[in-house]
Image: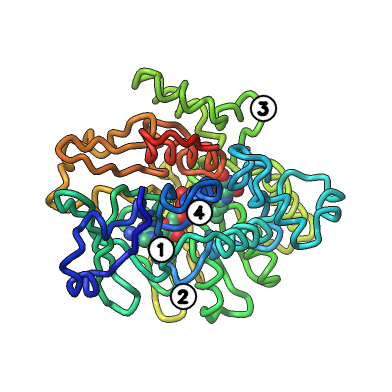
């Protein structure tokens, strides 16, 4: 593979002697969250042992202005849901300098961390680890740049990108790896507003919000984020009431016992991928509580103890409204009146809230929205789901170009698809597929 420059459309127009292929980068990564960061490291570490003319050229575009990992939810004390050993590299290459352990070493905290006796660092610390890795990695990352459309020129992909300033450019690439992650979901019919918002940007939204001294909050949802938000608001506003609305009877504990956890093993991807469609659906249903709509048991106990203590002291601030859903919201300048309806039709509770936080989950970005008219998208999808081979390659029958999906393939590759658990092995598999035919092995 040749080392090539990445040129914008404007510059490219002034260089007619260079053809599309020469102007193309080998890999364009769309999105620069942990998934494509892990890939960027795999490319860098492989390039390090190769002569310059054998190296893979890569470039990444990221909508955000700088690196960030769900920073709106970096609540104090909230911890990782997976072992730090499932970092960006260790399951691919335990000796990589991009490991969490090396990060700790560089920050002079390795021994102190060992004394914590935990596999689960805080999310703030893990965010710092990811940011440290993103800063170190050599691949060019264009922050504040959003991929808007992918077209096939006949020999390479041409990706139309928009910068934060509104400028449009074209980046040419032989292969594309889409790592666009997840986007927040509000229930149908809920209109977001200054006081009605998804938890994804919680810290940012709260910092700009004026609330009463004895504020009142409604938190909708029964998963880990919903429970964390309820606990956080209860702590941060010591005089506020927090009303949690759950469709369930109570928060359900996340199953992180070892046999269930095997669903996140790299080897399980094979087993899941080769299973017939009905078995995949059954497995996802069985193991839903390892990841979705489930809460750390410790946090459930903590919330229960708070509520119980308040009952004994006669000063209620935390209210869990079970088997309820939001039936209406009227948002005004200073607050929002929320109706919480019993799902069994047994009445309604009105809460005059300062803010309503919907911790109602996420869904993957759809790659289909990026595919332009020159890409045969119809064959690449089975109704809403992308058809993807074991090596994460989107089925594109009409063109030789390859688009890999680094995430967003839970239906075919299993629960790790939207998580950190399998990032490092997946990066290896994608890079190996990118290099198909190349004799230099990927570590
Ligand atoms: C609060 C919270 C806590 C979590 N904790 C854990 C945990 O402990 N363990 C775990 O395994 N998982 C956890 N997850 C799941 C989470 O999905 C993964 O941690 C991780 O973010 C997946 O990485 P990713 O790179 O696939 O996606 P993301 O982190 O979502 O990154 C995708 C990136 O792509 C960018 N992007 C999207 N579209 C475009 C575009 N068109 N052009 C350019 N850039 C684009 C986005 O801005 C984003 O930065 C958590 C999720 C949340 C919300």
State the mark number for residue 37: 4
| Marks 3 and 4, how far apart at CA | 28 Å
| Marks 4 and 2, how far apart at CA | 40 Å
Asked if marks 2 and 1 touch (Cβ < 8 Å), the reply is: no
Foreground tag (4 vs 2): 4
Horizontally, residue 112 falls left or right of residue 299, namely right
Q: Secondary structure at mark 4?
A: helix
Specify which label sits upstream in the sequence, 4 or 2.
4
Residue 74, percent from left and from top: 61, 62
Asked if the beta carbon under badge 1 is closer than 8 A to the nearest atom of ligand 1, the reply is yes
Specify which label sits upstream in the sequence, 3 or 2.
3
| Marks 2 and 1, how far apart at CA | 35 Å
Residue 305, percent from left and from top: 75, 50
Residue highlighted by disc 2: 335
In the rendered image, the vertical position of residue 34 relative to residue 430, given as above or below: below
Frontmost residue, 412 versus 286: 412
Q: Residues within 10 Å of mark 4 (few under 14, many from 20)?
A: many
Foreground tag (3 vs 2): 3
One can see residue 221 in this view: no
State the mark number for residue 258: 3
Asked if the beta carbon under badge 4 is closer than 8 A to the nearest atom of ligand 1, the reply is yes
Q: Secondary structure at mark 1?
A: strand
In the rendered image, the vertical position of residue 34 relative to residue 355, given as above or below: above
Q: Residue at x 37, y 30 (%)?
A: 412
Residue highlighted by disc 1: 62
State the mark number for residue 120: none
| Marks 3 and 2, how far apart at CA | 45 Å
Residue 352, percent from left and from top: 49, 69
Horizontally, residue 292 falls left or right of residue 343, namely right
Foreground tag (2 vs 1): 1
Frontmost residue, 111 versus 170: 170
């Amino acid at each position: 593979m040749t080392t090539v420059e990445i040129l914008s459309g404007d510059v490219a127009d002034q260089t007619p002697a260079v053809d599309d292929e020469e102007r193309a980068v080998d890999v364009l990564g769309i999105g620069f969250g942990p998934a494509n960061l892990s890939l960027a490291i795999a490319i860098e570490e492989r390039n390090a042992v190769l002569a310059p003319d054998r190296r893979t050229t890569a470039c990444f575009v990221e909508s955000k202005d700088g690196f960030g990992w769900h920073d709106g939810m970096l609540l104090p004390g909230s911890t990782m849901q997976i072992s730090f050993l499932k970092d960006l590299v260790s399951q691919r290459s335990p000796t990589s300098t991009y490991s969490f352990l090396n990060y700790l070493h560089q920050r002079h905290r390795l021994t102190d961390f060992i004394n914590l006796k935990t596999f689960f660092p805080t999310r703030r610390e893990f965010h710092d680890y990811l940011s440290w890795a993103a800063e170190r990695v050599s691949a060019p990352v264009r922050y504040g740049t959003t991929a808007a459309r992918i077209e096939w020129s006949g020999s390479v992909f041409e990706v139309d990108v928009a910068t934060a300033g509104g400028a449009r450019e074209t980046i040419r690439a032989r292969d594309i790896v889409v790592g666009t992650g997840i986007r927040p979901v509000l229930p149908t019919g809920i209109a977001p507003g200054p006081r009605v918002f998804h938890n994804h940007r919680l810290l940012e939204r709260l910092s700009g919000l004026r609330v009463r001294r004895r504020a009142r909050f409604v938190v909708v949802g029964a998963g880990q984020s919903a429970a964390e938000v309820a606990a956080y608001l209860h702590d941060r506003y010591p005089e506020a009431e927090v009303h949690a609305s759950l469709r369930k009877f109570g928060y359900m504990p996340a199953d992180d016992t070892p046999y269930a956890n095997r669903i996140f093993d790299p080897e399980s991807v094979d087993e899941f991928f080769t299973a017939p469609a009905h078995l995949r659906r059954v497995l996802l249903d069985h193991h839903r509580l390892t990841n979705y709509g489930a809460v750390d048991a410790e946090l459930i106990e903590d919330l229960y103890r708070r509520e119980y203590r308040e009952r004994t002291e006669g000063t209620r601030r935390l209210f869990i409204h079970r088997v309820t859903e939001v039936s209406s919201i009227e948002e005004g300048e200073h607050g929002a009146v929320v109706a919480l309806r019993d799902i069994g039709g047994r009445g309604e509770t009105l809460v005059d809230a300062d803010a309503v936080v919907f911790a109602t989950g996420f869904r993957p970005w759809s790659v289909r929205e990026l595919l332009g008219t020159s890409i045969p998208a119809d064959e690449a999808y089975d109704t809403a789901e992308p058809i993807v081979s074991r090596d994460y390659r989107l089925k594109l029958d009409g063109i030789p170009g390859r688009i890999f999906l680094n995430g967003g393939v839970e239906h075919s590759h299993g629960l790790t698809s939207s998580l950190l658990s399998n990032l490092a092995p997946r990066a290896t598999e994608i890079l190996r597929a990118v290099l198909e035919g190349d004799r230099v092995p990927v570590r």
